[in-house]
Image (cartoon, grey):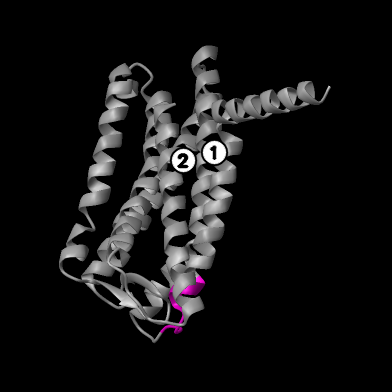
Amino acid sequence: MMLVANSCFAGILFGFLIFSVRLFTLENDLKQIAYKDFLCSLRGYVGYAICSIQNCSYLLQSIYRFVSVVYPTHLFYQSARFQLFLICLTWVFGFLYPIAFLFTGEIIYNVDNQICQLALRLSFSIIYMANCAYIIPVSVTMFIYLILVRYVHRMNKHVTPMNRLARAQRELKMARRLFILVTILFILCFPYAMFILMSFFWSIPKYHFRIAYVFIDVSYVFVIIALFQFTDPLKMSIMKRINRRSNVVVATIT
């Protein structure tokens, strides 16, 4: 539950960040000005940090599912204390890895796209950012899911205690939901990755960031919907509050 809450919290923060960035872009577009406010570079930095933290949160969940199935007797690695340690580790890493971009001035204001980001070109910073924020956590999450699928299928073929098999199948179901989430991110964030790759060899469209972030915004909406749908405690809590309010309204009317 702690790992799921971490993913939800990171998702909420990412939503606030997206709203802030879009508000800044919209304001400059409406005023038809090229203006970099003092928070522009900071928003770019926080964006890279939260993106990594969010993707790593899904990775932590997949690792937990893997350990629960493959090493069910290693209770320390399933404990809340160890989970909290990993969560803190990902948050520290998330805010540390892009800090050099902030102080070296590599996060620059792009006038055409009205956003502060790393310039897309063949550079160590771009490759480093892409790996830390997207490629490594997403690919490892997918890899763990595939290993888990093979392991559970192998358990089905051998004599396995029913309680352990049932738990493995339950964890596999949760891992499958994570895989769906990560697949959504992979597909809808692909244009951004494509523009990065294109920038290594060719010139990219003038409004590349605007195009890429349309897909990122859409992916965020789908991920939040999927998180709500897949997180049963959160879903039940929200539905309970909605039903409670509707009952209060009905009682007031009657």
- Circle 1 packing at 10 Å, graded few (<14), some (14-19), many (20+), is some
Magenta residues, as a range? 204-211
Where residue 58 sits in the image (x, y, percent)? 42, 41
Q: Vertically, is 57 above or below 254?
A: below
Mark 2 and mark 1 lie on one chain; the one further toward the N terminus is 2
- Circle 2 packing at 10 Å, graded few (<14), some (14-19), many (20+), is many
Q: Identify the image quadrant of the N terminus.
A: top left
Residue at 29% from the left image edge and 55% from the top image edge: 132
Residue at 27% from the left image edge and 49% from the top image edge: 94
- State which quadrant residue 59 falls in: top left
Measure the alpha-carbon separation of dots 2 and 1.
Answer: 7 Å
Comparing 143 with 229, the one in front is 229
Q: Is residue 82 left or right of residue 240?
A: left
* Residue at the spot of label 2: 145
Residue type (three-letter) at the residue carrying disc 1 = Arg
Looking at this rendering, what residue extends furthest in the right direction?
254
Q: Vertically, is 63 above or below 211?
A: above
Comparing 197 with 4, the one in front is 4
Where residue 22 sits in the image (x, y, percent)? 47, 64
Query: Label 1's element?
Result: helix
* Residue at the spot of label 1: 176
Q: Quick check: marks 2 and 1 in contact, CB under 8 Å?
A: yes
Q: Which mark is residue 33?
A: none
Where residue 45 sits in the image (x, y, percent)? 28, 60
Query: Label 2's element?
Result: helix
